[in-house]
């Protein structure tokens, strides 16, 4: 409520309501390879990181990764808030779909370290996707990797 008084004028009043609401979660997705270029046959790591930059928890946040044909996935480690957790995933049509995180708090960080190997020379890529209950379309990032003959 606000009131304004001025000499020679009638007092003015105004009432209004203010609602403060939290913004929904905002997911940031980053992908990198730890070496590039990589020799064919050599093992290396991809690192996929998701951070909730919003003020609210995100529900059912899921990471999916898929390599191009010249890259073979070997295994993965998953870290949530710096703590290693079980790397449950299913492989479907060449994609690795990691178990969803039911409740991904504000400022939380998920890291997936994927152990991979280059199996043929050329320019390849890793496609990482993150989806959640917040967005109707997933967020996608591609990381290029060059494999060279030994």
Image (cartoon, rainbow, N blue to C red):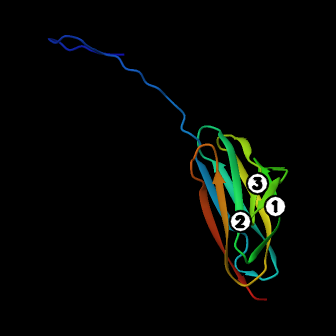
Q: Is residue 52 left or right of residue 12?
A: right
Label 3, label 1: how far apart the Cα atoms are: 10 Å
Depicted 1 relative to depicted 71: above or below: above
Secondary element type, mark 2: strand
Disc 1 target residue: 76
Q: Earlier in the sequence, mark 3 or mark 1?
A: 1
Name the quarter where the N terminus is drawn.
top left
Residue shown at 74% from the left, 47% from the top: 100
In depth, the one of 137 and 34 nearer the eye is: 137
Q: Tell me the mark number nearer the camera, choosing from 3 and 1.
A: 3
Label 2, label 3: how far apart the Cα atoms are: 11 Å
Assess whether mark 1 and mark 3 are in contact (beta carbons under 8 angstroms). yes
Residue shown at 64% from the left, 69% from the top: 143
Residue shown at 72% from the left, 51% from the top: 110
**Image quadrant where residue 2 sits:** top left
- Relative image position of residue 26 (x, y in whole percent): 58, 46
Label 2, label 1: how far apart the Cα atoms are: 13 Å
- Relative image position of residue 99 (x, y in whole percent): 77, 50
Q: Earlier in the sequence, mark 2 or mark 1?
A: 2
Disc 2 target residue: 66
Disc 3 target residue: 98
Name the quarter where the C terminus is drawn.
bottom right
Assess whether mark 1 and mark 2 are in contact (beta carbons under 8 angstroms). no
């Amino acid at each position: 409520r606000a009131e304004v008084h001025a000499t020679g004028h009638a007092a003015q009043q105004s009432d209004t309501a203010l609602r403060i609401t939290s913004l929904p979660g905002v997911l940031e997705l980053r992908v990198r390879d730890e070496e590039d270029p990589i020799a064919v046959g050599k093992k290396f790591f991809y690192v996929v990181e998701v951070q909730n930059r919003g003020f609210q928890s995100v529900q059912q946040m899921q990471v999916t990764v898929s390599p191009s044909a010249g890259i073979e996935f070997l295994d993965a480690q998953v870290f949530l808030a710096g703590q290693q957790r079980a790397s449950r995933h299913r492989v479907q049509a060449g994609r690795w779909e990691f178990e969803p995180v039911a409740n991904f708090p504000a400022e939380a960080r998920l890291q997936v370290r994927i152990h991979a190997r280059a199996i043929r020379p050329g320019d390849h890529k890793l496609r990482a996707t993150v989806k959640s209950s917040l967005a109707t379309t997933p967020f996608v990032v591609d990381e290029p990797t060059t494999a060279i003959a030994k």
